[in-house]
Protein backbone atom coordinates (compact mmCIF):
# COMPACT_ATOMS: atom_id res chain seq x y z
CA UNK A 1 0.00 0.00 0.00
CA UNK A 2 1.05 3.60 -0.48
CA UNK A 3 0.11 6.52 1.77
CA UNK A 4 1.51 10.01 1.19
CA UNK A 5 0.73 13.36 2.77
CA UNK A 6 2.24 16.15 0.69
CA UNK A 7 1.92 19.79 -0.32
CA UNK A 8 2.52 19.00 -4.02
CA UNK A 9 -0.24 18.24 -6.49
CA UNK A 10 -0.69 14.69 -7.82
CA UNK A 11 -1.27 13.11 -11.23
CA UNK A 12 -3.89 10.35 -11.20
CA UNK A 13 -2.60 8.77 -14.42
CA UNK A 14 0.93 8.41 -13.09
CA UNK A 15 -0.34 7.06 -9.76
CA UNK A 16 -2.60 4.46 -11.43
CA UNK A 17 0.22 3.39 -13.72
CA UNK A 18 2.53 2.89 -10.74
CA UNK A 19 -0.06 1.03 -8.66
CA UNK A 20 -1.07 -1.50 -11.36
CA UNK A 21 2.38 -1.95 -12.89
CA UNK A 22 3.29 -5.53 -13.81
CA UNK A 23 0.17 -7.02 -12.24
CA UNK A 24 -1.85 -8.75 -14.97
CA UNK A 25 -4.34 -9.98 -12.35
CA UNK A 26 -5.78 -6.47 -11.99
CA UNK A 27 -9.19 -6.33 -13.67
CA UNK A 28 -10.60 -3.27 -11.95
CA UNK A 29 -9.27 0.09 -10.80
CA UNK A 30 -11.56 2.34 -8.75
CA UNK A 31 -10.53 5.87 -7.90
CA UNK A 32 -11.78 8.99 -6.14
CA UNK A 33 -10.51 12.57 -6.23
CA UNK A 34 -11.70 15.22 -3.80
CA UNK A 35 -11.29 18.84 -4.93
CA UNK A 36 -11.70 22.29 -3.37
CA UNK A 37 -15.17 23.82 -3.93
CA UNK A 38 -15.59 27.58 -4.18
CA UNK A 39 -18.57 27.53 -1.82
CA UNK A 40 -19.19 25.98 1.61
CA UNK A 41 -22.19 26.44 3.90
CA UNK A 42 -23.42 29.23 1.63
CA UNK A 43 -20.23 31.32 1.68
CA UNK A 44 -17.71 31.86 -1.10
CA UNK A 45 -14.41 30.20 -0.25
CA UNK A 46 -11.28 31.96 -1.52
CA UNK A 47 -8.79 29.39 -0.20
CA UNK A 48 -8.33 26.80 2.49
CA UNK A 49 -5.45 25.57 4.58
CA UNK A 50 -5.15 21.93 5.57
CA UNK A 51 -3.32 20.87 8.71
CA UNK A 52 -2.47 17.32 9.78
CA UNK A 53 -0.82 15.34 12.58
CA UNK A 54 2.42 14.04 11.04
CA UNK A 55 2.87 10.38 11.89
CA UNK A 56 -0.61 9.68 13.19
CA UNK A 57 -2.28 10.76 9.95
CA UNK A 58 -0.26 8.31 7.85
CA UNK A 59 -0.67 5.57 10.44
CA UNK A 60 -4.42 6.02 10.61
CA UNK A 61 -4.81 5.87 6.81
CA UNK A 62 -2.64 2.74 6.68
CA UNK A 63 -4.94 1.21 9.30
CA UNK A 64 -8.00 2.07 7.17
CA UNK A 65 -6.45 0.43 4.09
CA UNK A 66 -5.59 -2.66 6.16
CA UNK A 67 -9.25 -2.88 7.24
CA UNK A 68 -10.36 -2.53 3.60
CA UNK A 69 -8.03 -5.36 2.59
CA UNK A 70 -9.56 -7.54 5.29
CA UNK A 71 -13.10 -6.86 4.11
CA UNK A 72 -12.82 -6.93 0.32
CA UNK A 73 -10.86 -8.88 -2.22
CA UNK A 74 -8.54 -6.14 -3.48
CA UNK A 75 -4.90 -6.14 -4.50
CA UNK A 76 -3.55 -2.77 -3.50
CA UNK A 77 -4.55 0.74 -2.49
CA UNK A 78 -3.04 4.20 -2.58
CA UNK A 79 -4.00 7.38 -0.74
CA UNK A 80 -2.42 10.76 -1.45
CA UNK A 81 -3.66 13.69 0.65
CA UNK A 82 -2.47 17.25 0.23
CA UNK A 83 -1.85 19.73 3.07
CA UNK A 84 -1.03 23.42 3.11
CA UNK A 85 -2.89 26.17 1.28
CA UNK A 86 -5.24 25.16 -1.55
CA UNK A 87 -7.57 27.13 -3.81
CA UNK A 88 -10.88 26.27 -5.52
CA UNK A 89 -10.33 23.75 -8.36
CA UNK A 90 -7.24 22.33 -6.61
CA UNK A 91 -7.11 18.60 -5.95
CA UNK A 92 -7.11 17.61 -2.25
CA UNK A 93 -7.21 13.84 -1.98
CA UNK A 94 -6.74 10.81 -4.21
CA UNK A 95 -7.78 7.22 -3.44
CA UNK A 96 -7.03 4.38 -5.87
CA UNK A 97 -7.92 0.72 -5.31
CA UNK A 98 -6.96 -2.15 -7.60
CA UNK A 99 -8.70 -5.51 -7.60
CA UNK A 100 -9.81 -8.40 -9.72
CA UNK A 101 -13.37 -7.19 -10.13
CA UNK A 102 -15.19 -3.86 -9.89
CA UNK A 103 -17.56 -4.61 -7.00
CA UNK A 104 -14.88 -5.00 -4.37
CA UNK A 105 -12.76 -2.19 -5.83
CA UNK A 106 -15.69 0.29 -5.76
CA UNK A 107 -16.73 -0.68 -2.24
CA UNK A 108 -13.21 -0.55 -0.82
CA UNK A 109 -12.55 2.84 -2.44
CA UNK A 110 -15.71 4.34 -0.93
CA UNK A 111 -14.99 2.76 2.47
CA UNK A 112 -11.45 4.19 2.55
CA UNK A 113 -12.77 7.64 1.73
CA UNK A 114 -15.64 7.50 4.26
CA UNK A 115 -13.31 6.34 7.02
CA UNK A 116 -10.62 8.88 6.09
CA UNK A 117 -13.16 11.71 6.39
CA UNK A 118 -14.14 10.73 9.93
CA UNK A 119 -10.92 9.22 11.34
CA UNK A 120 -7.74 10.55 9.73
CA UNK A 121 -6.45 13.64 11.57
CA UNK A 122 -6.74 16.48 9.05
CA UNK A 123 -8.33 19.86 9.70
CA UNK A 124 -9.50 22.47 7.19
CA UNK A 125 -9.51 26.20 7.75
CA UNK A 126 -11.21 28.17 5.02
CA UNK A 127 -10.93 31.80 4.07
CA UNK A 128 -14.23 33.49 3.13
CA UNK A 129 -15.30 37.12 2.68
CA UNK A 130 -16.11 37.18 6.41
CA UNK A 131 -12.62 36.02 7.42
CA UNK A 132 -10.98 32.68 8.22
CA UNK A 133 -12.89 29.90 9.98
CA UNK A 134 -12.24 26.29 10.95
CA UNK A 135 -14.54 23.89 9.15
CA UNK A 136 -16.86 21.94 11.47
CA UNK A 137 -17.17 18.18 11.19
CA UNK A 138 -20.37 17.11 9.41
CA UNK A 139 -22.91 14.68 10.79
CA UNK A 140 -23.48 13.42 7.22
CA UNK A 141 -19.86 12.19 7.17
CA UNK A 142 -20.42 10.25 10.40
CA UNK A 143 -23.54 8.69 8.90
CA UNK A 144 -21.63 7.77 5.72
CA UNK A 145 -18.92 6.06 7.78
CA UNK A 146 -21.46 4.35 10.03
CA UNK A 147 -22.93 2.50 7.03
CA UNK A 148 -19.79 0.37 6.87
CA UNK A 149 -19.99 -0.84 10.45
CA UNK A 150 -20.14 -4.63 10.47
CA UNK A 151 -23.43 -5.69 11.99
CA UNK A 152 -22.82 -7.70 15.16
CA UNK B 1 8.07 14.32 30.95
CA UNK B 2 5.23 13.87 28.50
CA UNK B 3 4.71 15.65 25.19
CA UNK B 4 1.34 17.32 24.71
CA UNK B 5 0.26 18.46 21.23
CA UNK B 6 -2.62 20.71 20.19
CA UNK B 7 -3.99 20.97 16.66
CA UNK B 8 -6.15 23.30 14.58
CA UNK B 9 -8.69 25.35 16.56
CA UNK B 10 -7.22 24.18 19.87
CA UNK B 11 -3.67 25.19 18.89
CA UNK B 12 -4.91 28.70 18.10
CA UNK B 13 -7.09 29.00 21.21
CA UNK B 14 -4.30 27.86 23.53
CA UNK B 15 -1.49 29.69 21.75
CA UNK B 16 0.76 26.63 21.53
CA UNK B 17 1.11 23.57 19.32
CA UNK B 18 3.41 21.53 21.54
CA UNK B 19 4.73 21.48 25.08
CA UNK B 20 6.68 19.25 27.44
CA UNK B 21 5.00 18.70 30.79
CA UNK B 22 6.47 17.10 33.91
CA UNK B 23 3.86 14.45 34.61
CA UNK B 24 2.11 15.43 37.88
CA UNK B 25 2.06 12.48 40.30
CA UNK B 26 -1.71 12.71 40.63
CA UNK B 27 -2.24 12.24 36.88
CA UNK B 28 -2.73 8.58 36.02
CA UNK B 29 -5.02 8.67 33.03
CA UNK B 30 -6.32 10.93 30.32
CA UNK B 31 -9.20 12.19 32.45
CA UNK B 32 -6.65 13.30 35.08
CA UNK B 33 -4.44 15.03 32.53
CA UNK B 34 -7.39 16.88 31.04
CA UNK B 35 -8.46 18.07 34.52
CA UNK B 36 -4.89 19.23 35.18
CA UNK B 37 -4.87 21.27 31.95
CA UNK B 38 -8.37 22.71 32.51
CA UNK B 39 -7.22 23.98 35.93
CA UNK B 40 -4.67 26.24 34.21
CA UNK B 41 -7.25 28.94 33.54
CA UNK B 42 -10.15 30.24 31.53
CA UNK B 43 -8.77 29.68 28.02
CA UNK B 44 -7.95 26.06 28.93
CA UNK B 45 -11.34 25.40 30.50
CA UNK B 46 -13.03 26.96 27.48
CA UNK B 47 -11.04 24.83 25.00
CA UNK B 48 -10.94 21.50 26.85
CA UNK B 49 -13.85 21.65 29.30
CA UNK B 50 -16.62 19.04 29.54
CA UNK B 51 -18.83 18.92 26.48
CA UNK B 52 -16.31 20.62 24.20
CA UNK B 53 -15.81 18.84 20.88
CA UNK B 54 -12.34 17.49 21.63
CA UNK B 55 -10.73 14.24 20.50
CA UNK B 56 -7.61 12.86 22.13
CA UNK B 57 -4.91 10.49 20.91
CA UNK B 58 -2.29 8.87 23.15
CA UNK B 59 0.84 7.75 21.31
CA UNK B 60 -1.06 8.34 18.05
CA UNK B 61 -3.97 6.04 18.85
CA UNK B 62 -7.41 7.39 19.69
CA UNK B 63 -7.88 7.38 23.45
CA UNK B 64 -10.65 7.45 26.07
CA UNK B 65 -10.93 9.05 29.52
CA UNK B 66 -9.52 5.96 31.23
CA UNK B 67 -6.52 5.55 28.90
CA UNK B 68 -3.44 5.47 31.19
CA UNK B 69 -0.86 8.25 30.83
CA UNK B 70 2.74 7.34 31.65
CA UNK B 71 6.16 8.94 31.44
CA UNK B 72 7.26 9.52 27.84
CA UNK B 73 3.76 9.48 26.31
CA UNK B 74 2.71 11.71 23.44
CA UNK B 75 -0.79 13.06 24.02
CA UNK B 76 -2.60 15.05 21.31
CA UNK B 77 -5.78 17.13 21.71
CA UNK B 78 -7.70 18.11 18.59
CA UNK B 79 -11.16 18.92 17.21
CA UNK B 80 -13.21 16.38 15.20
CA UNK B 81 -11.40 15.80 11.91
CA UNK B 82 -12.38 17.50 8.64
CA UNK B 83 -10.06 16.13 5.94
CA UNK B 84 -10.81 14.65 2.53
Image (tube, coloured by chain):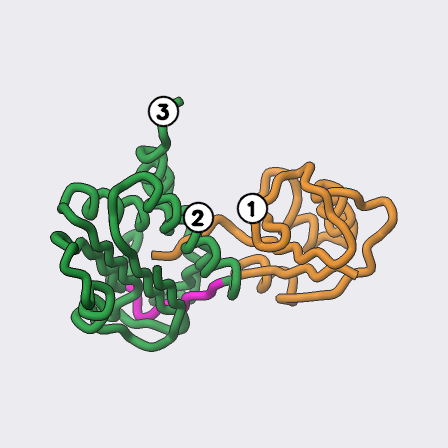
Check disc 2 and report the residue beneath it.
Answer: A119
What is the C-alpha distance between the residues marked 1 and 3? Answer: 22 Å
Chain of the residue displaying label 1: B
Q: Which residue is mark 3?
A: A151
Q: Say which chain is orange.
A: B
Would you say A66 lies left or right of A23 here?
Answer: right
Give the percent coordinates (x, y) of residue A10: 26, 73
Label 2 neighbourhood size at 10 Å, few (<14), some (14-19), many (20+)?
many
Task: Label 1: state its secondary structure.
Answer: strand
User: Quick one: SS at disc 2?
Assistant: helix
Q: Secondary structure at mark 3?
A: loop
Choose top left, top right, bottom left or bottom right for residue A2. bottom left
Q: Quadrant of the C terminus of chain A?
A: top left
CA distance separating discs 2 and 1: 9 Å
Residue range in magenta is A45-52
Horizontal side of A80 relative to A60 (left or right) equals left
Chain letter for the green colouring in the rendering: A
Comparing A118 with A4, the one in front is A4
Residue at x-position 16% and y-position 55%: A26
| Residue at point 20%, 43% (across, down) | A104
Circles 2, 1 touching at the beta carbon (< 8 Å)? yes
Amino acid sequence: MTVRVQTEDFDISAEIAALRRDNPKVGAIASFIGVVRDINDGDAVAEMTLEHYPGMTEKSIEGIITQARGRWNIFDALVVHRVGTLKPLDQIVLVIVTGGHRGDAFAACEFVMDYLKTRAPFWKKEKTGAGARWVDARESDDIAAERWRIKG
Amino acid sequence: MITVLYFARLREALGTGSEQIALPPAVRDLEGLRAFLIARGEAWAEALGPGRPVRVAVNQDMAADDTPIVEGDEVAFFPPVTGG
